[in-house]
Image (tube, rainbow, N blue to C red):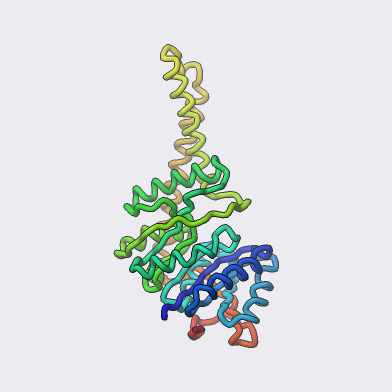
Amino acid sequence: MRSYSIVVPLHNEEENVSALYARLKQVLEQIGGLFELLLVDDGSTDRTYQLLKEIAAVDSRVLVVKLRRNFGQAAALAAGFDHASGEFILAMDGDLQHDPNDIPKFLKKLEEGYDIVSGWRKDRIDNLILRRIPPRCVNWLMAWLSGVDIHDFGTTFKAYRRQVIQSVPLYGEMHWFIPALASWYGASICEIPARNINRKRAIATAKSGAPSGCSSIFSAILFAMKVLNSQLDTTSLHAPMFVIAAVLILSGVQLLSIGLLGELHVRHYHSVESNAPYTIDRLVRLASSEEQGTLSGEHGTRF
């Protein structure tokens, strides 16, 4: 019988914890088999951890991993992956934007032999400008650069074979690149449509791409004006717009270069020092009557 682990990173999700657990429990019990829930508290400052403790106190299939501070989504996922015991590992967000009813479809594809199954928010209901256009541009660029033909790199909703995901280094924002990194190891990857439930949060992609996006808008406006009126001297009439567009383009290139240099530095640090990108404060599960302090990583099998 296959065993599987569900890894959920949470940061200040007190309003969603109970509902998420109830939905996951219902779906997973219907699927059957051996399963565990790894709920990672990524330095929450609200009541998220207290609610997670209450869940772990009544369900032995739940392991709560509390990190010492907010390390970010990639580190929280890495903590969950490192403590997962299942043959199959599925990751999803803790804000209810992913539908647990899609989990059987992911597990079915893994049973068919794929190493990674990526969710695809095919019918997104987000705001068109801020939540759909920038991610599409980023996903197209990542697919072109990596050679991995999937539509949605940014979603957390993915399923993995344990031996594959535990060989991929995670830190910073590397969870975006898991399919690309795994493909270099020879992993087989497929993509399935997954339901997308709207959430009211800002997206980092739109912010990080603001300079390049604004410069593209300015350039498009100037180009359209020149095409519509070939006699128009756009250089003399709209010199400020040219200057602004040029500055924004250079700013975008500089930010991209700084990001790449920073990524190389962080990658070198983790590859040489072999440091985990997170620090565990404690692990909580029903098998222990007291919360444990910082552990060395040995926590036993929970199946």
* Residue 270 in view here: no
Q: Residue at the left extreme?
A: 186
Residue at image point 48% right, 31% down: 245
* Residue 282 in view here: yes
Residue at image point 41% right, 76% down: 87
Viewed as shown, does residue 44 lie left or right of 108? right
Position above or below: 271 against 58: above
Residue 29 position in % (x across, y down) = 54, 75
Tally the marks.
0
Residue 254 position in % (x across, y down) = 45, 43
Quadrant occupied by the N terminus: bottom left
Of residues 175 and 237, the one drawn nearer to the viewer in this rendering: 175
Residue 294 position in % (x across, y down) = 57, 80
Viewed as shown, does residue 270 lie left or right of 14? left
Name the image quarter holding residue 117: bottom left
Position above or below: 59 against 183: below
Of residues 66 and 24, the one drawn nearer to the viewer in this rendering: 24
Residue 143 position in % (x across, y down) = 37, 50
Residue at image point 47% right, 24% down: 222
Of residues 279 and 214, the one drawn nearer to the viewer in this rendering: 214
